[in-house]
Amino acid sequence: MSNAAIEDFDLDDVEVKSGPNAFKVEKDKKYRVGFPLLKENGRIRIQKVDYYQYSPSEDEYFSFRKPADEELCKQIEAKGAELRSHFVTALLVYRTNSEGKMLTPVDWDIQPVKLNGKKVANLKEINAEWDLATIDVSLSSSNPSFQEHTYTPLRDAIWRAAKDSPILAKLDLKEPITEAVKAAAEARAKEMADAIAYERSDAWIREKLGILSPEEQKAVAQAGKVADFEELDENDL
């Protein structure tokens, strides 16, 4: 038996790539959320992620971000991989009870949230009237299995409450959380695309899909030329 695929490591030396866990709505639960990842103009910032999904068999599939090499993309699609797109942004998720009411002491987390076209359209509709960058939203789902979202605008954004705001006193907050939330959202933005699909090297993609590298293609082509020459009869020269 060959051990070429087996290599020993110390546990502490093993590096495992794990992306951020994307937000998932649970059954019979309401959430209070905000959208703190902003552009310089104060509008909400989202990322569009193009990725391929490939199924080598009925029981297996994997995804990876679309590479920059357009020729490689053509080869990927020739293998039957499907090009897809999703949006993602950083979602502020407050600690609440199952009815979406704030709990004290106040706690929160920043999670990447996947947004399909329907979710984006619903958020744009709210944003046209309320400006999502300045309010919180109540989020629930009538179909958690498919992660469908129902959004209801709330009056204020707790994360934007100023030092003299009565909201802070009501929640027993001694200081605003604005800057901490914004910094955490910016930090999350650096890796939130991983919640959709990982970026993989061209070499990784070729190996997984069985695509020859340019060097290998040249070698195969050259080998074909040599074989053709060796098959020539002297009368063909």
Image: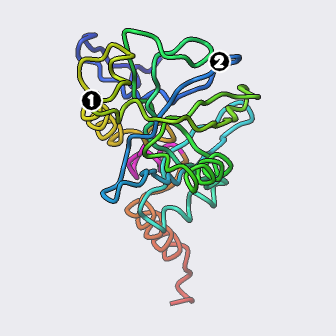
**Stretch in magenta:** 198-208
Badge 1 amino acid: Asp
Which of the labelled discs sits on residue 220, or is there none? none
Tell me which residue sits at (44%, 21%) in the image. 2
State the separation of the CA atoms marked 2 and 1.
31 Å
Q: Is residue 10 left or right of residue 27?
A: left
Q: Are marks 2 and 1 in contact (CB under 8 Å)?
A: no
Mark 1 Cα shell of 10 Å, populated few (<14), some (14-19), many (≥20): few
Q: Is residue 76 left or right of residue 14?
A: right
**In x, y percent, where is residue 173?**
30, 17
- Label 2 or label 1, whichever lies nearer to me, is 1
Tell me which residue sits at (55%, 40%) in the image. 114
Which residue, given by chain and number where applicable, does mark 2 sit on? 29
Tell me which residue sits at (40%, 23%) in the image. 109
Which residue, given by chain and number where applicable, does mark 1 sit on? 164
62 falls in the magenta region: no
Closer to the camera in the image, 155 or 148: 155
